[in-house]
Each structure stands twice: as C-alpha cells, then as structure tokens.
Amino acid sequence: MAIQPQELETSTREHLLDVAETLFLVQGVEQVSLRAIAREAGQKNPSALQYHFGNREGLIDAIVGRRLQQQEARRALLLEDALAEGGQIALREVCSVMSGAAFLLCREDTSFRDLLGALGLQRLTLASDYFTVELSQEAPSLLALWQLGRQALDHLPPEILAMRMENAYGAGLLAMSRRAHSRESFRGPRAELFFNNLVDQVTAMLQAPISEETKARM
C-alpha cells in the first residue's frame, strides 16, 4: 500500500522533532541552527523546518508539546489507578498524581529526563497555561485534578484556587527540572525522599490560609 502524503508529512515532522531533540541535548539548545537540524535529518530542502514549524520558537513549542502529551498520558494512568477504589482521593494524592507523572517519566525515560533538564527551566516550567479549562481537551487529567482539588478546597474562592493550582503545578515541574539538570537520580531512597517532600510542599501551597493582605486585594 502506498504511503499517503499526509502520513509522509507526519513522519517527516516527527523525524525532525527527534533529530532536533537529539542535537539540542548533545550541543545545547542555543548552539543548534535550523539548518543543522535539517541537514542532520537528511532534508535537502533547508526550509523544511519553516514549513512544519514556522520558526525556531515554533519548533521548540512543538518539542515541548509532544513531551506534555507524553506527560498527560502517564498522568492519566496514575489518576485512573488512584481513583480505582472509590472515585475520591485526598488532596495530597491529587498533588502526588499531579507531580508524579513527570517524576516517573524522568525515571523511566532518559530522553524525557534530559530534555526536562535542558529545556525545563526555560520552557516546560512556563507551561502554566496548560493547567486551564480551555486546554482540557488536550489535558483531561489536569481538568479532573482541578475538579478534585476544588472539592477538597471548596472554601477557597475560585480565582485563588486557580492561581494556586497553576503555581503548584509549575513549582513541582521546576523542582524536577532542576534535579534533572543537575543529573541527580530519580531512583532510590533519596529520590523517594525528594518526591514525597515535594508532594508535601505542593499540598501545603494549596492548603495555606489566605492572608489578610491577599483578602484586601480580592
């Protein structure tokens, strides 16, 4: 059966992303040109990357988006397991699922870990917009976690809860990107201590009382 043009286009796009990730990790994000990526990918036409991604920013956004989808798939499995027994989970477990996907992927997939270390401080930790109702079709597990968090923290005004959930998500990802960047292990007792303490911190962020200073500005 002949390969359809759309399938070929998708295959080319994924190949370009694979090559770009590899070059970014080996040489550094700022040191790799679009021309070098196209050449390494075997593209005779140097404008192939512009065709698929627009520009350098579009390429990096596509790399991040693909990894966020990977994280979403892992998080959905964690949430399914957490809800298996009764359909309700405590706030700390909500936070464990929220941060656990990236932690486990760093343990299971060295390319995810290395990319989080290389790009996380610049890109992945700026993805708080990913934690919005508007993107729920792309990240249904985050929407489910939002709803579970709202049930556990129903005393918080929606605006405050939204800010806290975004900040908690970003803080957890930032901590893991720093660990990945420093090449610390995601296995063993020290890694488990890191993760459980991180979940404690994220849970505390959500549960913190609203100060009078914040109330005055609501």
Image: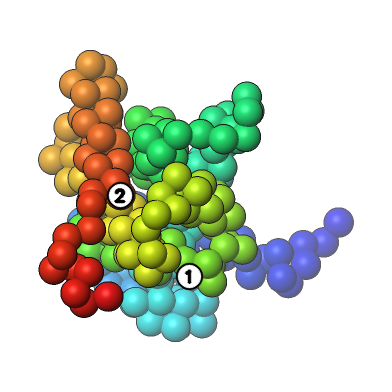
Crowd class of label 2 (few under 14; some 14 to 19; many from 20; radius 10 Å): many
Q: Is residue 173 visible?
A: no
- Taking the spot 58% from the left edge, 29% from the top edge, the residue there is 81
What label sits on residue 3 in the rendered view? none
The one of 85 and 54 positioned closer to us in this rendering: 85
SS under mark 1: loop
SS under mark 2: helix
In the image, is 79 to the left or to the right of 17? right
User: Quarter of the image containing the N terminus?
Assistant: bottom right
- Report x, y in % for residue 136: 57, 63
Q: Name which quarter of the figure residue 86 lies in.
A: top right
Residue at numbered disc 2 = 206
Q: Is residue 9 visible?
A: yes
Q: Quick one: label 2 or label 1, which is nearer the N terminus?
A: 1
Q: Name which quarter of the figure residue 102 lies in.
A: top left
Q: Name which quarter of the figure residue 120 lies in.
A: bottom left
Question: Residues at badges 2 and 1 in contact (C-beta under 8 Å)?
Answer: no
- Report x, y in % for residue 175: 21, 45
Q: Is residue 197 above or below residue 169?
A: above
In the image, is 36 to the left or to the right of 82? left
Q: Is residue 14 above or below residue 201?
A: below
User: Quarter of the image containing the C terminus?
Assistant: bottom left
Q: CA distance from mark 2 to mark 1?
A: 48 Å
Disc 2 vs disc 1: which is toward the camera?
A: 2
- Taking the spot 53% from the left edge, 53% from the top edge, the residue there is 147
- Report x, y in % for residue 59: 40, 71
- Taking the spot 17% from the left edge, 32% from the top edge, the residue there is 184
Q: What amino acid is at disc 1?
A: Gln
The one of 191 and 3 positioned closer to us in this rendering: 191
- Report x, y in % for residue 15: 51, 59
Residue at numbered disc 1 = 43
